[in-house]
Every structure is written in C-alpha cells, then in structure tokens.
Image: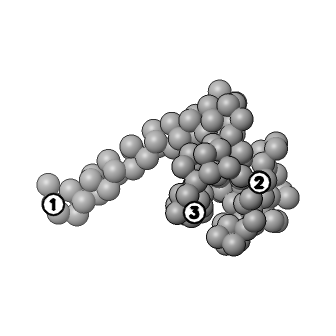
Amino acid sequence: MSKIKGFIVVALASLLPSVATASERAQAAWDWIEQDAVVIDVRTVGEFQSGHLQGALNIPVGELDRADLSFLAKNQPVVVYCRSGNRSGSAEQILLSKGYVKVHNGGGLNELMSVKSK
C-alpha cells in the first residue's frame, strides 16, 4: 500500500470513533438534562434566536469567561452546547477552570436534536 493510501485509511478510521462519540455525548447530555442540569447554549445571540433547546440560557463562549455565573453552584451539573461541539468544548474548559466540577459538552444542537428524536 502506498504511503498516501495508508494515510487516507488511517485518517478515515480516525473519524469513525468520533461519530460514535458524538452520539454518546449527546445521549449523555440528555441524561444530564433530564436530571435537571443547567443548559447553556454558547452560540452567538443570533444563532440562539434562530432556535435553541427549551430552557437553555444563552451565554456566548466569548463572554463566558467574564459572565456573572453567581446563579450557578460550583457542583451544579451543567450541559453546554453550540453548533458543532467546538465552542462548547472551549466552554467546558472555561467552566472547569473556574471551579465548576460537573460540566458536560453536549456537542452541537443538531446532534442533540437527532439523538432526542430517536
């Protein structure tokens, strides 16, 4: 097998676990939500206004570091989500660095909705 073909096979194989992981993280997010986790949508205000999970708070990831989170206990379960899971991954790290101990990256809104509809 040529080096290029080998690289392509390895690259494609590395994508497979992330598909399963995406579904698993979305299902875990719903489990947390059903147990009364606070849900934070970290997309922009415009994205939030175009549709969001019922009961979600909108705190864009760019504002999360300086947002007033005094309403949130450090041990309160929190699910963060965005469009694809990238910004929510950053949000998860920001919250963990602030001392929140139960934070879950739920991934993207469409990902969450596709799991919920099953």
**Residue 115 or 76: which is nearer the viewer?**
76
Circles 3 and 1: CB atoms closer than 8 Å: no
Please say whether residue 110 is visible from this viewpoint. Answer: no
Callout 1 secondary element: loop
- Residue at (52, 63) in percent of width and height: 97
- Which amino acid type is shown beneath numbered disc 2? Phe
**Up/down of 45 relative to 41, above or below:** below
Callout 3 secondary element: loop
Q: Which residue is mark 3?
A: 98
Q: Nearer the viewer, mark 3 or mark 1?
A: 3
3D distance between C-alphas at marks 3 and 1: 48 Å
3D distance between C-alphas at marks 3 and 2: 14 Å
Q: Which residue is mark 1?
A: 2
Q: Nearer the viewer, mark 2 or mark 1?
A: 2
- Residue at (27, 52) in percent of width and height: 9
Name which quarter of the figure residue 102 lies in: top right
**Up/down of 18 relative to 88, above or below:** above
| Place of residue 22 in the rendered image (x, y in percent of width and height, measured from the top left) | 51, 43
Residue at the extreme left: 1
- Residue at (24, 60) in percent of width and height: 7
Name which quarter of the figure residue 112 lies in: top right
